[in-house]
Image: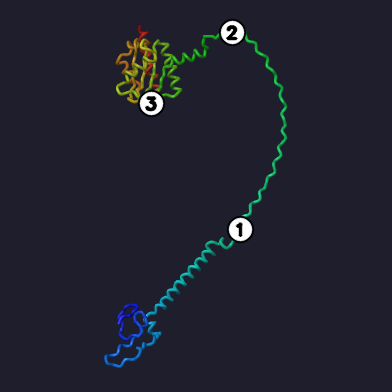
């Protein structure tokens, strides 16, 4: 037998479907052949299923009522959550926000300006026009004595301590000695200390420096201290060459080796120039 609702196989003669609980009307079986027929076939009246059986098999109405109950509970929770949000998260929704009252503006009194006192006007005295001199002042072409002395000092410089081996006192004393020997001999004496001279260029540097300062046509002597190459050089030009032989130069430079080793440069240069001047003085005395 098949349930007309869920189409499940059920035992013959069942009054309700054990799967879905559908009530089945029982139909009287047809009478056998030869049996006396009744006037009208009678049908079995509807009999409700016992409560225990319906609950065991699962009544669809009962399932629907549980689903409705769950939906109702969810809706209630949503309403409670909305109320909490409105009351606590947005307090201004129920309680009106009090606007701040504008602060009172205090207007400071305008200070009264101090009275302006005018200073007494000074009387302007008109300057008398200066009469122009009819005779123009002629400009003098002659130099003053101070300018002449300055130009002479520049021309008579004989100490060029470019390596800073001497102090100012030593430079002044050496310059005075050189001036004295120049008056006695008529020669030019030049002292130069320099740095940055190329190797093996001491002699050419000394000759070029003397020519630049005094000229190649003058008679004189140059004493050069080459600080980079650790050399002292003595060169003579024109007349002094007759008195300063190679041997004489070696003797003069050897005599000042101790002062040079002790860095007494001023004393060493003064002695060299003094001995060169004595060569001419002694030669003149012998004549």
Residue found at x 71% / y 28% = 119
Query: Mark 1: few, some, or many residues within 10 Å (few <14, many ≥20)?
Result: few
Q: Dot 2 corresponds to which residue?
A: 136
Q: Position of residue 209 (x, y in %)?
A: 36, 17
Q: Which numbered disc flags the more N-terminal residue, 3 or 2?
A: 2
The N terminus, quarter of image? bottom left
Q: Dot 3 corresponds to which residue?
A: 263
Residue found at x 66% / y 50% = 104
Q: Which residue of the protein is positioned furthest toward the front in this rendering? A: 39
- Give the answer, above or below, for where 202 lies relative to 44: above
Residue found at x 44% / y 74% = 68
Real-space Cα distance between discs 1 and 3? 96 Å
SS at circle 2: loop
Q: Position of residue 61 (x, y in %)?
A: 41, 78
Q: Which numbered disc flags the more N-terminal residue, 1 or 2?
A: 1
Q: Dot 1 corresponds to which residue?
A: 98
SS at circle 3: loop
Q: Which label sits in the foreground, 1 or 2?
A: 1
Left or right: 117 in relation to 30: right
Q: Are marks 3 and 2 in contact (CB under 8 Å)?
A: no
The C terminus, quarter of image? top left
């Amino acid at each position: 037998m098949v349930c007309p609702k869920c189409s499940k196989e059920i035992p013959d003669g069942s009054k309700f479907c054990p799967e879905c609980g559908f009530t089945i009307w029982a139909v009287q079986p047809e009478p056998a052949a030869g049996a006396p027929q009744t006037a009208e076939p009678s049908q079995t009246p509807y009999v409700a299923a016992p409560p225990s059986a319906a609950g065991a098999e699962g009544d669809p109405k009962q399932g629907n009522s549980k689903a409705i109950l769950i939906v109702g509970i969810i809706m209630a929770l949503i309403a409670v959550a909305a109320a909490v949000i409105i009351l606590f998260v947005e307090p201004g929704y129920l309680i009106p926000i009090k606007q701040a009252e504008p602060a009172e503006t205090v207007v400071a009194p305008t200070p009264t300006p101090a009275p302006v006192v005018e200073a007494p006007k000074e009387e302007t005295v008109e300057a008398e026009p200066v009469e122009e001199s009819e005779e123009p002042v002629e400009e003098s072409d002659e130099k003053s004595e101070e300018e002449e002395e300055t130009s002479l000092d520049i021309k008579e410089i004989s100490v060029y301590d470019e390596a800073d081996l001497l102090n100012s006192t030593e430079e002044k004393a050496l310059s005075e000695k050189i001036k004295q020997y120049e008056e006695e001999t008529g020669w030019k004496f030049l002292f130069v200390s320099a740095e940055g001279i190329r190797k093996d260029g001491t002699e050419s540097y000394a000759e070029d420096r003397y020519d630049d300062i005094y000229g190649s046509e003058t008679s004189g002597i140059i004493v050069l201290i080459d600080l980079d190459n650790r050399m002292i050089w003595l060169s003579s030009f024109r007349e002094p060459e007759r008195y300063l032989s190679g041997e004489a130069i070696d003797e003069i430079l050897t005599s000042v080796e101790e002062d040079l080793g002790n860095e007494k440069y001023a004393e060493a240069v003064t002695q060299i120039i003094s001995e060169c001047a004595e060569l001419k003085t002694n030669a003149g005395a012998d004549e």
